[in-house]
Image (cartoon, rainbow, N blue to C red):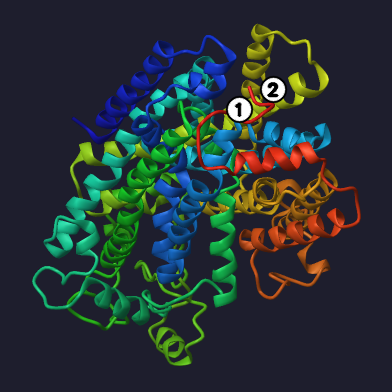
Amino acid sequence: MSLQAVTYLIVGLTFALYIGIAVWARAGSTKEFYVAGGSVHPVMNGMATGADWMSAASFISMAGLISNMGYGGALFLMGWTGGYVLLAMLLAPYLRKFGKFTVPQFFGTRYYSKTASMVAVACLLIASTTYIIGQMTGVGVAFSRFLGVSNSMGIYIGMGIVFMYAVFGGMKGITYTQVAQYVVLILAYTIPAIFISLQLTGNPIPQLGLGSDMVGSNVALLHKLDLIVQDLGFAQYTTSTRISMLNTFVYTVSLMIGTAGLPHVIIRFFTVPKVKDARSSAGWALVFIAVLYTTAPAVAAMAKMNLLKTINPQIMTDNNVFAADGQLEYESRPDWMKRWEVTGLLKFSDKNGDGRIQYYNDKSKNPEFMAKAEAAGWKGSELTVNADIIVLANPEIALLPNWVIALVAAGGLAAALSTAAGLLLAISSAISHDLLKENFMPNLDEKQELLAGKIAMAGAIVVAGYLGLNPPGFAAGTVAIAFGLAASSIFPALMMGIFSKTMNKEGAIAGMLAGIGITMFYVFAHKGIFFIKGTEFVNAVGGENFFFGIEPNAFGTIGAIVNFAVAFGVKNLTAKVPDDIAAMVEQVRIPRGSKAVDGAH
């Protein structure tokens, strides 16, 4: 059976499974639609949370960025995993005890203000919509290659699939669908990694293979990779940082606190019966997430090694990368390169006309290397490899069986679609419940609210698909911006709402507006207003990364600091918190019991 036929079969079967589960577990009430009735088992909730959390950025893009960035890419692993620990310890149990369905509901009650709730809705919509752009980017990448359609058509198909199981199933359908999606995506990620680790190092455990010697030699995989990338003018793989140590630090913090402020993850802790179960499901989610996150560095390094071996066939035995016949002839390129060229995500341009592929760092600041490249007749790097294809192309590069390649396609789609569904539900609940029911249309009955939620979700799918057609960058980079927006707006207000009895509504509202405002300004300056290309204005305000060399993807930390500072400054100039609110905050922090606090559902 051909690769295309196997791919259609496996992807088709997984889609049928997801839609079947959604129909079986469809929501019949608002509580089932928003929080699956609050009756999901902690282990299953942990698995669903893992699928919800491990998006296209984690599955498709993260290993690609680590592959490109080397050691500096570890900030994604540390930020996203560390942030989940932060969420599990500092926020989830208290929010679950509070008893509200959504984050804006918490803000509305804790800050005794509908305005605070509406500002939270706005921040949630901005962060979640940006996040979905990254998922749709991943959907387009996966579909365009494995189903033989254009990137645009891939996004349209993805929109249709999500619509079917998210709109009809609600949180109940999404939860059980995500359990199946977790199984698919984790098998799709680890099975190829085991095969490739065996090929390169003889060790079937990728995490151990990363530190092992290569087959037939006494040279460690990472040491050999360091030598190869430096021979090609790149920075040493195992030591390079992202721009600067300051940027790496604030980037990591932004991802951490952004994780703890993302509403589609927070809402997961309302789907279990008790506070104890919220803590338990957080622990299980970390276990399930760790399987992929500890495998990612091995996937990244091994994919990099296989790619460079393919382009420079003699590099494993002859370290002279400048030899006349040392590079792959374009006409002799393997089939996987031909297939990815069709998508436009892999491009070759023969700059020196020799018919061979030169792939190196043509912007290297090493004068000795650049002199050798010039002497060899190299006129610039000729291969462009989109970071988002590394994981999906990895089994093809390693010449693995067709069923493994098809499984990776199914896994990538499962990762993107599972997170997109969770985000869409967060958007839906924010519009139908927090905006309409709580503020503008209080007389909505349950049936009308459910319909409004489904309409809002359908509208969000259309907007997300449109934005996904023109993303501001790689999937993981776009998602990092979303985390920064959540970090600068939602996280500080949550922390102050739980741990500060004196934070009042004026301070919280001012802090959220200031935090997200300054972050959006910095992001839009670099990426364009609302990510519209051609509207960037960074040169008018100081040039690229003008604030201490910090890139826009990492700016959420600065936004959060501004949020805290403005909130406490305004709080000190305005009326103090009512006594009953201060007492409620104290009650939320009491670790005993699992009943909801006063004013909860």
Q: CA distance from mark 1 to mark 2?
A: 9 Å
> Where does the C terminus fall, quadrant-wise?
top right
Q: Which mark is residue 433?
A: 2
Residue 9 can be seen, yes or no: yes
Q: Would you say 430 lies left or right of 8 here? A: right
Name the residue carrying label 1.
Answer: 101
The vertical placement of 400 against 465, above or below, is below
Give the mark, 1 or 2, whose residue is nearer the N terminus: 1
Given residues 449 and 414, the one toward you in this image is: 449
Q: Residue at x 56, y 11 (%)?
A: 29
* Three-letter code for the amino acid on which mark 2 is drawn: His
Residue at 73 percent across and 56 percent down: it is: 519
Percent from the top left, x then y, of residue 560? 69, 58
* In the rendered image, the vertical position of residue 169 relative to residue 302, given as above or below: above
What label sits on residue 51 in the rendered view? Answer: none
Mark 2 and mark 1 in contact (Cβ < 8 Å)? yes
